[in-house]
Image (tube, coloured by chain):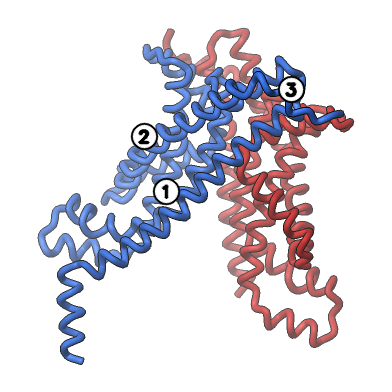
Amino acid sequence: MGFKLAYLLSILPNLVSAAAVNIRLALAIMLLALALGTALTVVRSLKIVAVNAVIAVVISFVRGTPLLIQIFIAYYVLPAVGLDLSPEVAGVSAIAFNSMVFVSESMRGGLATIDPGQIEASTALGLPPRAIWLKVVLPQLFRRIVPVLINEATIVVKGTALLSVITVVEVLRRAQQIASTSYRPFETMIGAALVFLVINLVISLSGKVAEARFARARI
Amino acid sequence: MHFNPALLFDYWPLLLQGAWLTVQVSAFALVIGYAAGVAVAMFALMPGWLPRLAAGLYIETLRNIPFIILIFVVYYGLPFSGIRLPATVAGTLALALFVSAYYAEIVRAAILALPRGQFESARAIGMSPVQAMRHVVAPQILRALVPPSTNMTLTMMKESAVLSSITVPELTYQSLVVQGNTFAPFEVFAAVASIYWLIAIVIAEFSRRLERRVGAAQIESINRNPIAERYLSLVARRA
């Protein structure tokens, strides 16, 4: 049983069509993670002791447990407390929650690099806190974390492959279905790996282009 | 919905067995992965485009495909090339392969951050490249290596949960077994998440101590270095 390149090529179109699911889910996750991560950063910056203590525990939990376990929790535990989610929604919420924490952590790092003089100046000019966040801090923060966000996007795309374990039919699940009828798991898995490789390389490369543009815009 | 941890009473040994395997698998992957990572980093730093290209391909490929797919590729690919290994061994090798790419990047970045003159001076006084790496570069990058390496080891330990998909009986696999037996997802996943959390906290604490020790050892070694000592004493005498 040798490696059959022709077979690998023949299943690629099928896998690529399944990749649309991964891309769609990854996009939804990134948007959610960015919105929630920003909100979390703003809440943390209010420095309410009790709230921040709770957030610190949640962050430690998310960073200390595997994403796979977090997906299982969303899929198996949430229905038990009355939240019956479809596999797709459960998976998206789990990964988005995980990603939100990492986005917020890197935003906190970026926040430290913003000159406090700007915030003092905005306050002196009488800008309300909402305007300081929206017009002064966040635009700079987003630019600064572009490289982190690109990296996070590739991690999220890789994370969507885990959703196969909760029956979401994405690239890996489709590959497993193909392999179970053709008995050629090796070629099939190489095909799935190639699909992810291409998606992530495209993200990294476009990220580099975006970074270069932002770097120019800053000057 | 009631939270009843007593349900798990009979299953604690199973979960702890799984946790122990998770620790073992991660430890082996750490050792094998680090060795491979250092080797790949050396390739990446070699003069000439061919080794650099090979190392770059290795690193980029492994970093851009999901670990769960890598695991299946290794699991199905090994028998394909005539090697039959138990799932646990194949899984550990896949984990080591995965993490080696990240360790390679960490080592490479740490070496590149060191002024080039260090290596060149060592070569100029007649050390071989290996000697220069061992006596001059390695002691200096040690401190820079510890924080990112422990961070990556933590990530790797968490990724080992994916080994459950090729039936390696580690913590996540056992949690699914227990969940299938008890139908108590809340209790099971609360317990398992806590165990992972605990392992993560232990690794983080260990890394903090290691960091402090390496930092301290480095300062000490500079002080104890005969050349440095002579220089320092000369300076002291002149003053």
Chain designation of label 3? B
| Residue occupied by mark 3 | B7
Is B11 left or right of A40, judged from the image as shown? left
Q: Residue at x 60, y 53 (%)?
A: A207
Q: Position of residue B29 (x, y in %)?
A: 42, 33
Tags 1 and 3 in contact by the CB under 8 Å rule? no
Do the residues at discs 1 and 3 belong to one chain? yes
Callout 3: helix, strand or loop? helix
Chain designation of label 2? B
Return the residue nearer the eye: B147 or A85: B147
Q: Position of residue B196 (x, y in %)?
A: 59, 37
Crowding near pointer 3: few (<14 within 10 Å), some, many (20+)? some
Chain designation of label 1? B
Q: Colour of chain B?
A: blue
- In this rendering, the answer to whether A123 lies above or below A83 is below
Q: Earlier in the sequence, mark 2 or mark 3?
A: 3
Do the residues at discs 2 and 1 belong to one chain? yes
Q: Which mark lies nearer to you, 2 or 1? A: 2
Q: Position of residue B49 (x, y in %)?
A: 31, 47
Give me the C-alpha separation between circle 1 and circle 3. 45 Å
| Residue occupied by mark 2 | B32
Return the residue nearer the eye: A88 or B213: B213
- In this rendering, the answer to whether A1 lies above or below A31 is above
Q: Amino acid at mark 2?
A: Ile
Q: Residue at x 84, y 80 (%)?
A: A127
Q: Could you say which chain is coloured red in the image?
A: A
> In this view, which residue lies farthest toward the bottom?
B239
| Residue occupied by mark 1 | B105
Callout 1: helix, strand or loop? helix
Crowding near pointer 1: few (<14 within 10 Å), some, many (20+)? many
Tags 2 and 1 in contact by the CB under 8 Å rule? no
